[in-house]
Amino acid sequence: MTDKTEGTYGAASRLNHWIGAVLFGALLIVGFILSYDLLPDEQAGEVRNLHKATGTLLLLFAIWRVTWRIGQGFPAAASERTGWELALSKAVHGAMLLTLVVMPVSGVSMSLLGGRPIDMYGLFTIPPVAEMKDLARSLRAVHGYAAYTLATLIVLHIAGALKHSLIDRDGTLRRMLTGKSPAA
Ligand code: HEM
Ligand code: HEM
């Protein structure tokens, strides 16, 4: 199931991509809802706990994905691409993978270094390790900037996927959906 040799994405990459897309997308939306105070106070606390627990789980997911991608590399582009298109897609994919790690790392560290625990769905609690409020504030700012960056990258990413499937019709979306190599 190596990605490179078959010119497509293997089952592990596709599973990781689509579960990740749904969960990261949901956390982005919930995060913005929380930070713009769109929920009544009595709901916000519970939703924030769920955001933190799910984000913490996604840290494992992000590490899995990035180490997998570093190990396997990206499959070659599905069709002949000019220099700037290849460069843009590499830059967007690389920046996305980076922000996919920065989001949970900044989230976990702002909580645990800011004196706040992480309640894992009521099953167990990860206790805080320090109470460094200034550092936690900076990490909160990183979390916010990374969130806006990720949201922008996702818009570019979806625009790219639509261009490939509607204009180029080159099998890029198909290989991420079905694993079928574009050459097949
Ligand atoms: C893994 C992916 C994650 C994503 C995509 C995500 C996304 C977001 C977004 C979009 C915001 C609003 C940012 C802003 O407007 O400044 C936010 C806020 C926040 N996030 Fe995350 N987050 C993630 C993980 C985590 C983790 C692991 C924790 C903590 C363990 C966490 C804790 C928080 C907290 C406490 C806030 C502030 C909420 C409020 O203002 O009430 N996040 N997150
Ligand atoms: C409707 C939403 C989405 C569509 C249609 C979509 C489509 C695709 C496609 C077709 C590829 C393969 C590109 C290629 O063959 O070169 C891809 C790769 C990728 N996508 Fe998405 N995607 C979506 C959402 C997301 C989201 C929300 C994220 C991030 C949370 C994301 C992160 C990535 C990354 C990092 C890659 C590079 C390959 C990898 O490491 O898995 N995608 N996406």
Image: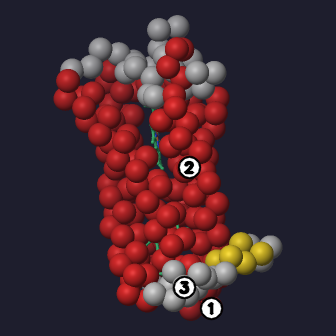
Q: Residue furthest bottom?
A: 41
Task: Tell which circle, 1 or 3, labels the residue nearer the N-terminal end.
Answer: 1
Q: Nearer the viewer, residue 153 or 96?
A: 96
x and y, in percent, of residue 158 in the image: 39, 42
Element at badge 1? helix
Q: Residue at x 51, y 80 (%)?
A: 113
Q: Tell me the number on the disc at residue 63.
A: 2
Front label number (2 vs 3): 3
Element at badge 2? helix
Front label number (1 vs 3): 3
Indicate the amino acid at tag 3: Ala
Indicate the amino acid at tag 2: Ile
For the residue carrying disc 1, how many other residues have a C-alpha within 10 Å: few (<14), some (14-19), or many (20+)? Answer: few
Question: Cα distance, mark 2 to mark 3?
Answer: 24 Å
x and y, in percent, of residue 77 in the image: 37, 21
Task: Tell which circle, 1 or 2, labels the residue nearer the N-terminal end.
Answer: 1
Q: Considering only vertical position in the picture, is 100 above or below 158?
A: below
Q: Considering only vertical position in the picture, is 27 above or below 38?
A: above
Q: Which residue is mark 3?
A: 130
Find residue 172 and report its image quarter: top left
Quarter the N terminus occupies: top right
Indicate the amino acid at tag 1: Glu
x and y, in percent, of residue 8 in the image: 51, 21
Q: Residue at x 51, y 28 (%)?
A: 72
Q: Considering only vertical position in the picture, is 178 above or below 103?
A: above
Q: Nearer the viewer, residue 157 or 141?
A: 141
Q: Residue furthest top?
A: 184
